[in-house]
Image (spheres, rainbow, N blue to C red):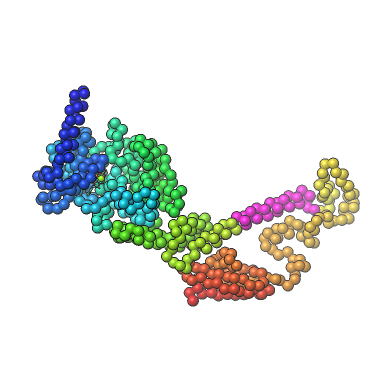
Amino acid sequence: MKVKRCLILDVILIKLHFMNTMEGQLLADRYLLKEEIGRGGMAIIYTGNDTLLKREVAIKILYPHLISDSNLMQRFINEARIIAKLNYRSIVSLYDIAEHEGIPFLVLEYIHGYNLRELYERLYKGERKPPLETALVIASIVCDAVAHAHSMGIVHRDIKPENVLISDQGDMKITDFGLAHILADTRITASGVTIGSPEFMSPEHISSSNISTASDVFSLGSLIYWLITGVPPFSADNTMSILTRISRNDYERTGKKGGIDDCIAGIVDKSLKPDPLDRYKDAAELSNAIHNVIDGFAPDPYILFKSYTTAPGQTARELAVRHNRIRYENAVAYIQSNRFEKALALISTILETGGETGDDSVDVSGLMRQLKYRKYKRLAISIMEIVIVLLLSAIIAREDYTGGFLNPSAAKSVPLTPVKPGIQVKQEPAAALQKKPKAPRKRSAPAGKTASQQVKAAYLHQPVKTAENNRKPDIGSLELITYPWAMVFIDGKYMGETPRFKTISLSTGKHEISIMNPYLKPHSEVIEIKPGQTLTKRINLNE
Ligand SMILES: Nc1ncnc2c1ncn2[C@@H]1O[C@H](COP(=O)(O)OP(=O)(O)O)[C@@H](O)[C@H]1O
Ligand SMILES: [Mg+2]
C-alpha cells in the first residue's frame, strides 16, 4: 500500500517537474508553449502560439494531481463543448482542448493585461476604500457575463477576482466558466483541501449539495461586497475559518459601513442569503437590480470601465458626483411623497460621501437641517396629539363619572371635591345644590358649552366664540402660488410644498419667505402681513 502511494507521488512529482520544464515545447503538434504567466488552484497558465492560425493564445495545463478519475478526458471534452458555445464580449473564448502525454490542456483567448485582484491591489492598497460607483460598474459587467452563461444553462462555479481579466485596452473578460465542474463535483477534496481560494465559495460549494445559478449569485454577492468594501465578506486567517464563516453566513452587513445606500446593501444581502431560494435566482436578476441603481449615473458600464482603467481617480470622482445628484433628486421625490425617513437616509449618504452634487445651487446641508427639524417637529406634534387625546379622555371620563357636572341630579349623589382620607368634607344639602345648577369649577365653561366640548373644539380648530375673539384680529394670511412647485420656508421653518401648500395664517408684521425647487434658483423676500388681510404672492422661479 505504502509502495503504491509512493509510486503515485513519484508520478505526480515527475509530471510537475515535467510541467516546470515545458516552456518551448510544441503541444499536440500545434501549440508552442512560451512563458508561464500564472499559477492558480487548478492549473499553470502559459502564453503560447497557435502555429496553425498564427495567433497568440493562453494555454492552461491542469495539475496532474487533480486528475483523479480515468473518465476525466471524456468529461473534459463534454464540458468543453458546452463552454465553447459561449461567445460574448465579456467572456474569454475557449478555442481548443487537447492532451499532451496524458495531461489535458485548454487553449484560450489570450488577454494581455492583468486580473481584477491585481487592479485593486494596485489602486486600493492598505486601508483605502474603493469607490462605490466604479465597484458597481465592474459588478454590472461581471454579472452581465455570468447572466449570458446562465441563459445558456452554464454555471460558472468559481467566480473570484482572479477570473476577471482586464486587457491593456480596458476590456473586461471573465474566464474559467464551468472549469471547476470538469475537475470535480466539489471544490473541496476528500482530504478537506479546497481547490483554489475558498473566499468566494457559496455554502453549497462547501456542502457539495446542488450547485445552481443561485450558487453563482452567492459568489457574485461576495465579489460585489469585496468590490465595494475592499475585503471579502467571509475573510479569515485560514481556510477552515473562512469555510466556517460561509457556512454560518457570518458577515458584517455593508449597510453598517457608512456611505453605502440601503438599496445597494440590500442587493448584497439578498445575494448572500444562506438559502439559495431566498437569493436572486440567477445573474440576470441580480444584474437587473444593479442596473436599477446605476443606470442613472453609469448608463454604459463598458465605456465607463475603459475610462476608469486609464483615469481611475477622475472617473470615480465624476461618477460619485453624478450618483449624489441622483440621490438628491430621489430625496426630493421622497419629500414630495412625505417619506421623510427615506429622504433623510439619502441626504445622510450624500453628506457621508462628501456632499458634492455638481450643482452649486443645491444646499444639501440646508435640506438636511430642514428634514431633521421636520422630523423633530413631527415627533413633537405626535407627543402633543397624544397628550391632548389623553387630556380629552380624562375629561370625558370625569364627565361620565360625574354624570355631567351640569347635571344637578348627578351633583346630588357625587361630591365634586375629592375626599381625602382624614379630611372632613362638609356636604351641602341636596336642596341647596339644586338651587345652584352650575358646579363650582376653577375654569368655568362658557354658557351652553362643557369644558370637554371646549377642548374638543380647540383640538378640531373650531373657534370658540368669546368676547376676546371678537376683538380686532392681529393675524392675517398669506396666499402663495409658485411656478413650478417649490418647498416653502417661512422664517426659516419648512412649511410644505406648493401647490399642496397654498394659504397660511400668519401673525401681523414682517416675515421672511424662501421658495426652493432643487432644479432652479431659490427665491427669498420679506413680506408684511396686515391684520385681517390676505396677501397674495405669485412667484415664478423661472424668471
Ligand atoms: N486567458 C488568459 N489570458 C491571460 N492571462 C490569463 C488567462 N487566464 C488566466 N490568466 C492569468 O493567470 C492567472 C492564473 O490563472 P488560473 O490558472 O485560472 O488560476 P486562478 O484563476 O485560480 O488564479 C490568472 O489569475 C490570470 O492572471
Ligand atoms: Mg482562473
Residue at 70 percent across and 51 percent down: it is 393
**Residue 182 vs residue 58, the one in the foreground:** 58
Residue 18's spot in the image, x, y percent? Answer: 15, 37
**Is residue 292 shown to the viewer in this render?**
no
Magenta-drawn stretch contains 390: yes
Q: Is residue 342 left or right of residue 405?
A: left
Image position of 329 (left or right of 310) = right
Count the marks: 0
Q: Residue furthest front?
A: 126
Q: Quadrant of residue 184?
A: top left
Q: Is residue 380 visible?
A: yes
Q: Which one is nearer the viewer's eye here, 45 or 503?
A: 45
Is most of the magenta stretch helix, strand or loop? helix
Name, please, the residue furthest toward the top. 1
Image quarter where the N terminus lies is top left
Is residue 493 positioned above or below 235 on the image? below
Where is residue 301 shown, x and y percent of the image? 32, 58
Q: Quadrant of ligand 2?
A: top left
Query: Which picture quadrant has residue 380?
Result: bottom right
* Lateral position of residue 513 relative to residue 171, left or right: right
What residue sits 85% from the left and 49% below the top?
A: 412
Rendered residue at 65%/55% (across/down): 384
- Residue at 59%, 73% in the rendered image: 526
Give residue 104's quadrant in the image. top left
Up-down relation of residue 153 to residue 476 (above or below):
above
Residue that extends furthest to the bottom in the rendered view of this protein:
543
Q: Position of residue 256 (x, y in %)?
A: 46, 48
User: Residue 136 location, x and y as percent?
Assistant: 36, 54
Q: Nearest the camera: 434 or 239? A: 239
The image shows residue 136, relative to residue 211, as above or below, that is below
The part of the chain drawn in magenta is 379-406
State yes or no: residue 528 in magenta: no
